[in-house]
Image (spheres, rainbow, N blue to C red):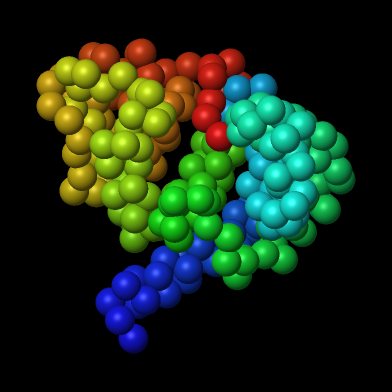
Amino acid sequence: MTAAKAQDADITGSIAAERRELAEVLAALPPESWDSPTLCAGWRVREVVAHITMPFRYPLPRFAFEMIRSRGNFNRMADRCARRDGAAPPGELASALRGNEGNPWKPPGGGYQGALTHDVIHGLDITVALGLGRRVPPDRLRIVLAGITAAKSVRFFGTDLDGIELRADDLEWSLGSGTPVSGSAQDLALLVCGRKLPPGHLQGEPSARFTGVAGQEEGNT
């Protein structure tokens, strides 16, 4: 096995574990939590789960059709489909995740690293907003951080980190230079991806600019 194939095998194992663990979290949620806001603007838990599972449920022709309906705007398409599909019963939405832990989907240009990032960040959109205290294992976070802190990824998310140094307090990881903002690695990953964190998750003088209320700030798909 080549080094690249071995790395892919490691990441696909992490993807399966992440989906399996998130499905367990969802199965334990009380019904009312499915209508709670998340860190994605305007999306409740049900819409986020619908979005996470959309790649499993939409074959390529269906995806292309939905993109055409949205005039090629992916964010518009993702929002419309999440709101429509999120109306499904919670058990059906959770089953779509539980039944696809080994699904080989990869985002265009993102590879398996992008697929893991997609699942981890959106899973945190749910668990952090609900205050569940779930911790993503460090090995998965390192893979996610390596991807989202690449220059092109930082530009994509558009988070203003000028004059800021992010410092993880649970991993040996930092990004940028300037006034420090510290927090857990998973919270800082959310910050880089444009999320606003609930109060108390970040430390440092500039942390207020990265803090908000679940569901009231603009999220990223």
Q: Give the image location of residue 87, x and y in percent.
A: 85, 37
Residue drawn at x 75%, y 39% as measured from the top left? 66
Query: In the rendered view, would you say 17 is above or below 53?
Result: below
Q: Is residue 50 left or right of residue 25?
A: right
Residue drawn at x 27%, y 42% as measured from the top left? 150
Residue drawn at x 86%, y 43% as measured from the top left? 88
Q: Which quadrant does the C terminus fall into?
A: top right
Which residue is more in the foreground, 5 or 208?
5
Q: Give the image location of residue 9, x and y in percent.
A: 42, 74
Residue drawn at x 62%, y 29% as measured from the top left? 73
Q: Which quadrant does the N terminus fall into?
A: bottom left
Q: Give the image location of residue 162, x and y in percent.
A: 21, 18
Q: Give the image location of residue 182, x and y in percent.
A: 25, 30
Q: Is residue 125 visible?
A: yes
Query: In the rendered view, would you say 210 is above or below 95?
Result: above
Which residue is more in the foreground, 195 or 84?
84
Which residue is more in the foreground, 81 or 178?
81
Q: Is residue 62 left or right of residue 163?
A: right
Q: Is residue 120 visible?
A: no
Q: Name the quadrant containing residue 168.
A: top left
Query: In the rendered view, would you say 163 is above or below 187?
Result: above
Furthest residue to the left?
A: 177
Query: In the rendered view, would you say 181 is above or below 138?
Result: above
